[in-house]
Amino acid sequence: FSAEDLERVVERVVTPESRSLRGSSRKTQRGRPIVTSDAVMIRILGVAEAVARSDATVLVQGESGTGKELIARFVHTSSTRARQPFVAVNCAALPATLLESELFGHEKGAFTGAQNRKIGKFELAHGGTMLLDEVSEMDLALQAKLLRVLQEREVDRVGGRDPIAIDVRVIATTNQNLAESVKKGKFRADLFYRLNVIPITLPPLRERKGDVKLLVEHFMKQYLGDNAPSLPKQVLAALMDYDWPGNVRELQNAVERAAILSRGQVPCEQDFLLNTGNRATLAEQVEIEREHTQQEQPTSGGLMITSGTTVQDMERALIFETLRATNNNRTQAANLLGISIRTLRNKLNEYAA
């Protein structure tokens, strides 16, 4: 696509009707909707739908939690490769030596511990789409090998002799400014230009506040069903006023947390446990909840407060209630409580002492 061609396609795809939609919801490969009424996001979806018709490499940039993988899946689902594999690799999750084997595969005996041949993700994605998530975390040596794969359309397994031809559409994502990384020598300029054929930059949620209400309603239905209660105006106002540094992912976690803590009642602001500057600790949040609840009355989370109940008692009850609601999934419970897994583990050890 030339710039002019792309502009014309976008104008056809993003119709006046879609621009005026209160909420646009388009499905990704896994049926996960992209919910938005924001003009910038609707235009981005139009661009994604347009470029899906080509095999051009796409670079999706944006803060963590803005939905970069959702956009990548949307491009794949909208393309002629939709029935073929969509393979995602998190480049930040593995050290360089393991990442190379994960991407390109290895032959038996290629290194200590390589007891069998391993087919790499690029081969597994043949005919489909390869997502390189957080590509900025890849070291320079591996970047050079990735560049060759993109140029030659073939991979070399670690320890292999013959290159293997591949037919893969590549989409890369990053939460970094890759142009700045190039200037600092942390990312290869030639690889950047190879990836940056179609650049898409996602706005943070704080720049699309109109979507907060839509997303809250969507996630409320997801966790509480179609009969999910409507939130009071003051609660919605607090959610709209919050900056959401973790973007849509943080909002989703907050709604899930509120759905658990409210136990079927209408969630209050405290149930969302927003990470605002005046809520430094879980204990302080419990104290606020205790002060605003009458004696002998359950909190919105269903926790009974009686005369003499301490903050520590409430904190303990809240932690165990969240563990019960998450079937003792400590990682999920810590996430919902807004604390680290280490803090949760220390609390549980303290209670067991």
Image (spheres, rainbow, N blue to C red):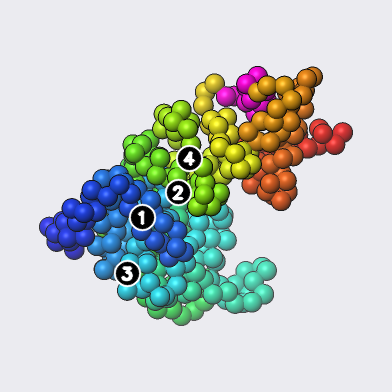
Instruction: Give the mark nearer the N terminus: 4 vs 2.
Output: 2
Give SS at disc 3. Answer: loop
What is the C-alpha distance between the residues marked 1 and 3?
18 Å
Q: State the residue in front, 193 or 31.
A: 31
| Residue at 60% across, 72% down | 110
Which span is picked out in magenta? 279-292
Give SS at disc 2. Answer: helix
Amino acid identity at mark 3: Ser
Residue of label 2? 218
Residue of label 4? 230
Question: Magenta includes 283?
Answer: yes
Amino acid identity at mark 2: His
Q: Residue furthest right?
A: 353
| Residue at 14% across, 59% down | 8
**Left or right for 188, reference 139:** left
Quadrant assignment, res 141: bottom left
Q: Is residue 46 above or below residue 267?
A: below
Check contact, mark 2 vs mark 1: CB within 8 A: yes
What is the C-alpha distance between the residues marked 3 and 2?
26 Å
Amino acid identity at mark 4: Ser
Give SS at disc 4. Answer: loop
Instruction: State whether the magenta stretch is mostly helix, strand or loop.
Output: helix
Crowd class of label 2 (few under 14; some 14 to 19; many from 20; radius 10 Å):
some
- Mark 4 vs mark 2, foreground winner is 4
Instruction: Give the mark nearer the N terminus: 2 vs 1.
Output: 1
Circle on res. 89: none
What is the C-alpha distance between the residues marked 2 and 1?
10 Å
**Left or right for 296, reference 26:** right
Residue of label 1? 25
